[in-house]
Amino acid sequence: MRILVAIGGNALLKRGDTLGIGEQRRNMGQAAAALAALAREHEVVLVHGNGPQVGLLALEADAYKGAPPYPLDVLGAESQGMIGYVIEEAMRRALPEREIATVLTQTMVDPADPAFAKPSKPIGPVYDEKTARALAAERGWAVAPDGPGGKAWRRVVASPAPRRIVQLAAIRRLVESGYLVVCAGGGGIPVRPGPSGAPEGVEAVIDKDLAACLLATDLDAGCLLILTDVDGVYEAWGTPAQTRIEAVSARMLDPATFAAGSMGPKIEAARNFALATGRPAFIGALGKAADILSGRSGTRIDP
């Protein structure tokens, strides 16, 4: 079976981790064995997030005043190379018999998407509210709470809906040739049609789960597996009454009732894939891929 696996940027950099490469290598190394076991039995395509990493790259670029800050599309391309390398490194150790390729991937968006006027996608490190608001005033950022309780705050940026994966044909050709493909990192480099029709970058970060849904549908995947830093979808998340949902019909889920920029897009992606294809989607913790598919962990979203 062909499985589209989406790995969250927050799964590679867990809450509380410093934004260092050592932490990402350690976390990916722990997940690689589970992903390798999956890849030995199935045709796997990997998509990854980049929220913490692209925010860190933006801070690093801003620290050097000798050049203008790099736009988010360029930083997204940087993050694809960096995270793709970390994933390849871990997967080559866990799966030495397979060919692996990382594809620099662009994703077309609509320049008139209303998301450009309503930043919602968290990027970069976590701050307390006072620090976040001070940075917002100093740097012209939009900031918002990230997670229950309102104690963690992050920068938020525009997150338009993905419309088309520009490198789809190349990705399909590699998959059909037996490669384990890492692609559409961070949802893809956000681009729009330029005056000549060729893609040109835009200032945004695309949600990787929505891009994964689009790619999974286009590649005729048997299921969509979204791996993150929590072990499933919860009712009453962040309260004493929180309960993990083991299985649910896609039509019973409303993405608007979940946190925008984090679990909300995961629900939307899983729901859209299930309804569009008639095939299941799964949400669960990085490192438990096989358990999620077998129903021992995570949340299953059925059409």
Image: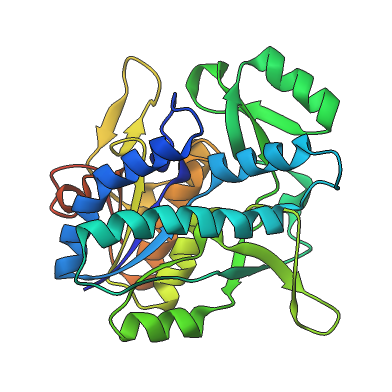
Describe the colour scheme in one phrase. rainbow
Residue 126 vs residue 296: left or right? right
User: Quadrant of residue 206 in the image?
Assistant: bottom right
Please provide percent x and percent y for residue 136: 78, 27
From the top left corner, tell me how far across and down residue 223 is, in percent.
Answer: 29, 65
Residue 134 sits above or below residue 78 on the image: above
Relative to 223, is 110 on the left or the right?
A: right
Q: Image point 75% across, 81% down: which residue? A: 198
- The answer, for residue 265, to whether it is visible in the render is yes
- Quadrant where the C terminus lies? bottom left
Residue 276 is left or right of residue 292, and the answer is right
Residue farthest to the front? 66
61 above or below 144?
below
Residue at image location 41% in from the left, 37% down from the top: 22
Horizontal side, residue 114 vs residue 222: left or right: right
* Residue 62, image x, y percentages: 77, 38
Number of numbered discs: 0
- Say whether residue 299 is visible: no
Residue lying at 76% horizontally and 35% vertically, measured from the top left: 63
Quadrant of residue 246 in the image? top left
Q: Residue 260 appears in which quarter of the rendering? A: top right
Residue drawn at (55%, 28%) of the image:
146
Q: Position of residue 110 (x, y in %)?
A: 72, 67
**Image quadrant in which the N terminus is located:** bottom left
Name the residue nearer the viewer: 275 or 128.
128
